Amino acid sequence: MDGQYVFTAQVRLEPAREFVSLDPNTAETTVTVFLEAAEPGTGDWLFFRNTLWRGEVGDEEHGRQLAEEWLDLPVESVSFRELQVDEEYFETLKAAIADDLEPFNADAVSEVLTKYLGSSIRVVDTEAD
């Protein structure tokens, strides 16, 4: 069972030495962060509910802070790309949501998925190897 959140972040470059200057000090290159998703019903499995809203980072400042922790670099911006899951993870996620819809303030699993992840869920085939 595999699931991972995919984010991109624009990082700010800061020279390690005083005699080095950068112009501009942000990189156009995008860093992609693959954050392993907790197994539904365990640990930080509600990360999507606490961090995302309609497929976007709900709180930009919080998102930048998270990305800075992940990368150990100053971050200018961060955006959510998708939740990549295999079929087993997706089914387990939907079952865990269905077990308790109240924390999501929703009446159906599909409403929860749309509310927090928008259309940014991609089910991948892990059997293709």
Image (spheres, rainbow, N blue to C red):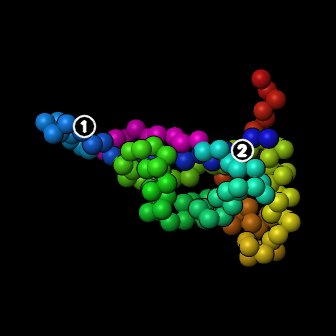
Magenta segment, prevailing SS (helix, strand or loop): strand
Q: Residue at x 56, y 52 (%)?
A: 80
* For residue 53, above or below residue 4: below
Residue at the image position 27 percent from the left and 43 percent from the top: 14
Which corner quadrant of the image does residue 22 belong to? top left
Res. 67 in view? yes
Q: Is residue 2 left or right of residue 26?
A: right
The kind of residue on which mark 1 rests is Ala
Above or below residue 14? Residue 110 is: below
- What residue appears at the point 58 percent right and 49 percent down from the top-left corner? 81
**Disc on the earlier residue, 1 or 2:** 2
Element at label 2: strand
Residue that mark 1 sits on: 16
Q: Position of residue 102 (x, y in %)?
A: 78, 75
- Where residue 94 sits, quadrant-wise, is bottom right
- When the figure is inspected, residue 45 is found, relative to residue 1, above or below; the finding is below
Q: Nearer the viewer, mark 1 or mark 2?
A: 1
Q: CA distance from mark 1 to mark 2?
A: 36 Å
Q: Is residue 33 magenta?
A: yes
Q: Residues within 10 Å of mark 2 (few under 14, many from 20)?
A: many
What's drawn in magenta, residue-wise?
26-34
Residue 6: in magenta span:
no
Q: In the rendered image, which residue does mark 2 sit on?
A: 3
